[in-house]
Image (cartoon, rainbow, N blue to C red):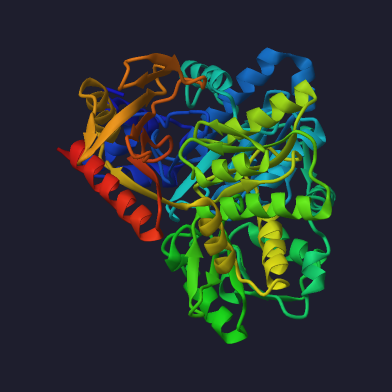
Amino acid sequence: MENYRIQYEKWLASDKVAEDVKAELRALSDEDVKVRFSEYMSFGTAGLRAEMGAGTAFMNTYTVAHATMGLAALICKLGEEAKARGVVIAYDSRNNSAELSQRCAEVLSAEGIKVYLFESLRPTPVLSFAIRELGCVAGINITASHNPKKYNGYKAYFEDGAQLSPDNAKTVSDAIAEIDIFDGIPTPDMAKPELIISVGADLDEKYLAKVLAEAVNPDAIPAVADELKIVYTPLHGAGTVLVPEMLRRAGLKMLYPVESQMEPDGDFPTVVFPNPEFPAAFEEGIKVAEKENSDLIVATDPDADRVGVMARDKSGAFKCITGNQMGALILDYVITAFKESGKMPDMPYAVKTIVTSEMAAEICRSNGVKMYNVLTGFKFIGEVIKNHEEAGEGTFLLGFEESYGYLKGTYARDKDAVVASLLICEMAAFYKAKGMTLSDALDALFERYGYFRESVTNITMDTPDGKERMAAMMASLRENPITKLGEKTIVEFRDYKSGKVIDLKSGAESETGLPSSDVLYYVTETGDVVVVRPSGTEPKVKIYVLTRGETDEGAIASADGCLEEIKKIMLA
């Protein structure tokens, strides 16, 4: 937005803007005004995510209502039947989430669209499940997932239970661009309460039944219930609602909650980052685990779609299992348990993203399971599930991505930390009966399939011109093709934006076969993979490195080397 001061003055002059919001705006420096009004939050397939506060670039009741009018325009375009099917709305523990979800309900109902509004916070996968269970045309979840406390976000879903497709997201974005943020939005008093239906416990029960039905070996946890000790923390988030109850129903007796983190709290007082990818998030859990001498610690993020685990290593110390490693462990466990019970389904398949460990692909190759690679974003995993269901073929075993998101079962179309927590605890029980820990099981995977290592880092551009700098960096990489990473020669290059795959040895070209996306993918002569892509929700460019070695030390050294070389090139 070129004239940020015009937008700023518009907010100050509008009678739709509350006086306390105007007071917040008047206290801003010109630089802060520029940050908050130089653009609108971009509505992509992942929805919106930003800091909370006044301004077009921040999350607040005005920008959320604006986005919801865009979604309403899509639904109204589909006709009266779509409006009658309605939209289900959920939210997590973040500050202002309940208020923002209520504002969404007001806007939609004012447009004659039925709304199902959860009575209190719920995990994201419950929202995904509820869309299809209720027969809704769309869904909204107010959450910023695992981001720091100053953030909130808006995830939009469609009738299949997955986040909006690029085409539908564009329709919503185009509609938003045509709607005035004040004059084009229904005011709260225009809401139609008769169209807003409260939902909760009944859907919880149906959802829990679906989750528990995904147990591969329902007898595993009860068999060691007097020995298996699990510490659980929701990190002040929505997991507190259903995860402990689910684990108790699965037969777990010795479940130790991290009491200091069980209460939902958008300030996340015990953690700087409520993200189970970070070891620091487990500090409170480790205290409980050491006191109770537990086997492992399970942590879900604020909207309970991601789960992280710490398990004891050979020395007895707690060590993080990465998202890549846990995905491989769960996949191998599901396959092993099915084979041992003689219940391996026909035409089994799994799905992972292109930035996720190739160990999973190796596990599938060795066990006759089809592996699909998709772009980053769980909606693409959901799309593969949907296509198989429509074709009436294949049995879905597992979908996962390196960022600690997993799904077993087709009742939802987004990552689910609730079912993942079930599988992780069941897997821990399975190995405990064999005298093994999860760390032992991971070592066994490396010995069987090879030593795989993955690294991820970010180049952060948290400045007013961050988007332009990110775009310039990606453009530079395309204009100046990388041919070497240190001493390693690049032998294959994939540009997912153009859809081209180039064999740099022969010059032959082929197609990626995936939708267009701003992703660059490099393969070295030794089989190492480096992937570069701008984040869709945060001001940073992400770098992924996937390596394989004859030893663990070799794989780690290769990953570190590739990461160092690509960063040198990008920051030059």
Q: Nearer the viewer, residue 365 or 397?
A: 365
Tell me if residue 116 can be seen: no
Left or right: 372 in relation to 548: right
Q: Residue furthest bottom?
A: 291
Left or right: 450 in relation to 35: right
Q: Is residue 493 above or below residue 543?
A: above
Residue 191 horizontal/vertical position (percent):
69, 32
Q: Is residue 527 above or below residue 178?
A: below
Residue 394 horizontal/vertical position (percent):
75, 31
Residue 340 horizontal/vertical position (percent):
78, 55
Q: Is residue 293 above or below residue 295?
A: below
Residue 212 horizontal/vertical position (percent):
80, 54
Q: Is residue 128 above or below residue 75?
A: below
Residue at x 71% of width, y 51% of height: 334
- Name the quarter where the C terminus is drawn: top left
- Name the quarter where the N terminus is drawn: top left
Left or right: 330 in relation to 496: right
Q: Nearer the viewer, residue 242 or 435?
A: 435
Residue at x 52% of width, y 47% of height: 359
Which quadrant of the view contains residue 541? top left
Q: Nearer the viewer, residue 16 or 559?
A: 559
Number of numbered labels in the structure image:
0
Residue at x 68% of width, y 55% of height: 333
Tell me if residue 64 can be seen: yes
Which quadrant of the view contains residue 301? bottom right
